[in-house]
Structure formats: structure tokens, C-alpha cells
Image (spheres, grey):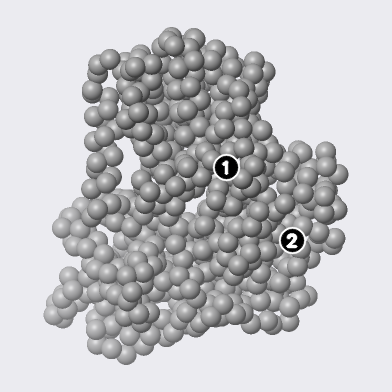
Amino acid sequence: MTELFAFLLSGITVGFVYALVGMGFTVIYNSSGIINFAQGEFVMAGGMSMVFILAAGVPLVPAFALAILLTALLGILLWKLTDLSKDSSQVSLIILTLGFAIFLRGLAEVVFDKELHTIPSFVGDGSLELYGAILSYQSLLIIAVSILIVIVLWLFFKKTTLGKAMIAASDNVEAAKLMGINIKRILMLNFAISASIAAIGGVLLTPITSTNYEVGIMLGLKGFAAAIIGGLSNPFGAVLGGLILGIMEVLVAGYLSSEYKDAVAFVIMLAILFFRPGGIFSNLKAQRV
Amino acid sequence: MKKLLQIIAVGFALFSTTLTAGDTIKIGAIVAATGPASFLGDPELKTLKHYTEKINAAGGINGKKLELVAYDTGANPKKAVTFTKRLLHKDGVVAIIGPSTSGETMAIIPMMEKAEVPLVSMAGAVAIINPVKKYIFKIVATDRMACQRIMQDLKDRKLTNLALISGSGGFGKSMRKQCKEVAPEYGIKIVADETYGKKDTDMTAQLLKIKNTADVQAVLNPGFGQGPAIVTKNFAQLKLTQPLYQSHGVASKKYIEIAGAAAEGVRLVSPPVVVADKLDDSHPIKKTALAYKNEYEKSTGSQVSSFGGHAYDALYVITNAIKAAGSEDPKKIRDEIEKTKNFAGVDGMVTMGAEDHLGLDTKSGMVLLDIKGGDWTIVK
């Protein structure tokens, strides 16, 4: 029993990491219909720039803000690229994000380096012991921040005029335009928000996993799987998708064999795409948020 | 920006070296200077360039200047094959150093054998030199040797039940296989055998499984990159009490830096160059290793890893052979490489023979280290 509990807890920690990445996918997909395959690279960009900004002697909080800002600018750059080629098909735009991802990886290799980097944990190296299971403080921080982001996103979309305009724009572009909503600006903002969420994830994750220029590949894939499981158009679904994925992975690794762990994400994803293409909650009539 | 310029400069240098012809001895090099194995190829290429210059500044070999013709494969075997063709048939080199990885090496072996030009590989797999092939040599300790060294230590400490947690990348996979093969020879039983993905961010599940396995007396983690650092951190978080062994894949200061306090008390096998300054003065390769370490760190500004040393050894094994042969005939050079005796390289003492195309002595080529106070201590 304690074993199962320990596995579950470990799965939840991993799951929130996937959730953070997954949420970014949904924010962009929601507004533009583009699956942004550079999402994992945004995570990497956040973490790597944090490492180097800190190394330059900037204190923690401004460094964090700067890392987010830098990544958000990359997000806006990607938006600009998609905007320049907005007459192309959806598939071309998705391929564009794939190219942007490769570009970012190469850029990180040149601007930063090819080494692994880490930063000290923000909340100390300690950990919480719960019935024989262990939760490090940094993991707790990730969980808390993920929940916070979900709440802020929810409030933003439900309560602010800008958030409502975003939902309107994703629901019906033409009608939104007629209502005087600046679609371009909305899209740009969505890319920036999505990149910022990724950067926050990347920075928080670095003390636990360390980072290098190619850390975004696997994180991006797992985050994508989380988003697919939860339904691509629903940021809150992505959180649940991430949790399901994290817990399944840990259970498979713990009770079956760690050899199958990485296959889990993709098996679940395929099953969802076959049987419930709208995401696991699609029967709950999940609309674009 | 400086980095960018450096990279452009290296790029130009790579091409320009092929253009300057003249009365020189051409040695080919195939390295994975970029891409997934750049941690190998990058220090290797830097080492080759630095020491080629050094040899030339000292007057070259047999009165001729050495010319290094280097190509970057990005760890792609197809490119390795293409570049080998170019080196053999267009550039006309007398010997080839490299490739950096085992897969690439295996891919070009048939061509080297056919062309009858000696190859000194910098890759790890045993298959490269076993069975012995006439023109193929290698310089790097095999992962089998690392396993043997660890198993011997476990035996000495009377720890017989070993749990494995291996990375699923090439390095971890190969070492896991070798360790499982040699374990019975030392009376060691593998009681748990876990793996993790190269890019995994959390190994708690696998370690929990090991924690819940009865009678685990020691844990070994073959792997390279960030994986072992995360394993080490999770290991400490879960308060596992068994001794943790790491492979030569983590033998760099980077590992201690990333794993932090959790690395305290970890034991690992390592090539001697990493601790060159701490070696006993009687250690046969102390002088070479220390000189290499200082020179590498001075000329590149980055910390020495165990990998650049392979390039040093390969280059000197070949140039020594050219000197001894007094000729640039690849066949004669091959014969002299095979006669290499008591060569004190960075990786260890090398004595080759007709039946041994590696010739590395395990005792001098592998040291056991403990991590204490954020630094290495040699286990006596």
C-alpha cells in the first residue's frame, strides 16, 4: 500500500511537469488551430536563459522575469513567422513550428553551449516525507505553480475582457472581427502566454532535471501527449492529461518494467486518438474554452 | 558571439586544411564534433588540432609536416562512410583516426580493410577489435573493462547482490549488457535490472522498485549525461543506503556539479586523466596525463574530459609508428602500430600485439574514485 502511494505521488510530480508543457500546446491551438511543436524548445529556452542570466550575476527574481520575457519574445517571433505565412495551409504552419524548434535548438547550441547545466533549487534541497513517499520541495513548488497558472488562466479567460475576446476569437474569427476584436493582437498574445508558461516550466524544472540545448525534445513530446489526452482545445484538460500520463508511466515502470515506460505515453495517445479524438473528456462536451 | 566566431573559425579550418597540399604527411580524422556525440567529438577534434600544431612546431615527423584532414560526421554512420571514401581516395591519407562512436566505426571497417590503410578508432565497443582485423586498432578502454573493475571491487567488499539501473542510450545499453555478462565470473548476482530513457526527468519509480527488492547490496548506474545525475539525486531523496556505483560515463566535474550534495559517497570507475594531478607519482601515465590535462585546459579554456585523451593517444600511436617505419607506406605504418610497446598514453599503458589491437592495460587504464567533499578521491 505504501508502495502504491509512493508511486502515485511520484506520478503526480511527473504529471504536473507534463501538464505545464501541455497547457502551452492548448493555448496556441485554441486560438490559431496550430499545433506548436516548438513548445518543448520554449521550455528549454526558459531554462537555459535562466541558467545564463543567473550566471551573469542577476538576482533570482529579476532573472526569472527576464527568462520569461526572453522566451515570450521568442513566442512572438514565432507568431510573426506564422503571421507572415498565414495564407499557407494549417499543415505548412505546423511544419513551420517544427522548423522553428530545430532552429531554436541550433541557436541554443551556438549562443549558449552543449553542456548540461543546473541551478540551485529555489526552496532548498529538502524534501517532505509522507507515509514513506518523498516529495522534494522543488516538486511541491512546481505543483503549486501549475495550479496557480491554471487558476490565473481560468480567471483570465472568464473574467477579463481581453480573455473573453480571446475565447470569442477562437470560437468564431469572423464574428469576433466584426465585434472589433483585433485578431492579430489576440494571436500574438496567445503565443506570448504559451511561451511564458513554457518558460516558467523550464525554469522550475531545471533544478530537478538540469537542462541542455536538447532537453525540449522529450518534454515537448510528453507535453503534446498530455494535451492530446486532455483534448487539445482545453488547457485544464491538459493538466488532467498530464497527471494521467505521469501516473500511468510510474505505475508501468513500477509494476511492469521501466522498459515500457516511454511507450505508455504514445500508446495512451494513440488509443485516445482512435476512440475519442476530442480528448478523454470529449463526452463531457468539452468546447474550446 | 565569441562562440559563434569560434564555430565559424573551426568550420573554415575544417575545410581549409584539406586545401593546402604540399610535401606533408596526411592523417585523416573522422569525428562527431557536432550532434548527439559531440561530447566525444568536440574535445577529440580540439585535441587533434592542438597536438598536430604542436608536432609541426617541433619540426614535424621524419622532416615532414603533419597535415590533419578532419571531417565532422555528426555521429552519422552514413556520413562516416562518405568521408572515409573521400579520405582514402581523394585526400590520400596514410592512416585514419576515429570515428568517435562504435556504430560509425563498424560501418567503415570493411572499407579500411579493403584499402589496407590503418584505422585507430576512438570508440568503445569490443566488437571493433574482437575478432582481430588486420588494419583495425582501437585506443579506448572497453565498457567490459569498466564492468570488470567494478565487479572486482564489489567482490572485494563482499557485496554479491547488485541492482542495475541503466540508461537506454547506446552507452548505458552496451555497458549494461557487458556488466550482466561479466557479473557471474565474480560471483555477483543481478537482483534487479531497471532502465530509464535518455531524457527522463524522474527515476523515482525505478529506484522505488529497487528499494523494495529484497537483499540489494549495491546499485550500479551505467549511463551518460543528465540521467546519472538525476538517479543520484533521486537515490539520495529516497534515502537508499546501499553503495551507489557510477560508470566512467560521469567521470567529469559536471556530474558533481549537477548532482550536488547527493553525489557525496558515490563510487565510480574513471580513466586516470580526470584525476591526473592526484595520481601517485609512480603511476606510469601520470606525466602524460597531467601534461595533457594542463595543455588541453590552457589551449581550449574548457575543463578536461576523459574523451579528448583518446585523440591524443590515437595521434601519438600513429605518429610514433610513422617515425618507426621511416616511411609513409600505410602497410608499414600498420606493422609498426601493431608493435606499439609500453606507450604511456593519456588513457593508460598501451602494448599491442598481433592478437591484441587494443593493448590497454586495465590496471593503469581504470581508477576507482570516491566523491568526497565535492571532489574526487582515489580509492587505494
Task: Tell me how many marks there are.
Answer: 2
- Between circles 2 and 1, the one closer to the viewer is 1
Q: Nearer the viewer, residue B162 or A86?
A: B162
Output the chain of dot 2.
B
**Given the image, on which type of amino acid does mark 2 rest?**
Pro
Query: Which residue occupies the extreme front position in the image?
Result: B281
Mark 2 residue crowding within 10 angstroms, few (<14) / some (14–19) / many (20+): some
Give the SS element for disc 2.
loop
- Residue under numbered circle 2: B243
Q: Nearer the viewer, residue B281 or B118?
A: B281
The C terminus of chain A: image quadrant: bottom left
Q: Is residue B33 visible?
A: no
Q: Residue B136 at what x, y percent from top left? A: 55, 20
Give the SS element for disc 1.
helix
* Residue name at image x 49 percent, y 18 percent: B321
* Residue name at image x 48 percent, y 73 percent: A120
* Residue name at image x 73 percent, y 81 percent: A131
Output the chain of dot 1.
B
Q: Quadrant of residue A180?
A: bottom left
Sequence-wise, which precedes: disc 2 or disc 1? 2
The correct choice, above or below, for B3 with respect to A131 in the image is above
Q: Residue A119 at what x, y percent from top left? A: 45, 70
Q: Is residue A200 visible?
A: yes
Mark 1 residue crowding within 10 angstroms, few (<14) / some (14–19) / many (20+): many
Q: Residue B359 at what x, y percent from top left? A: 63, 27
Q: Residue A18 at what x, y percent from top left? A: 49, 67
Left/right of residue A109 with respect to residue A265 in the rendered view: left
- Residue under numbered circle 1: B286
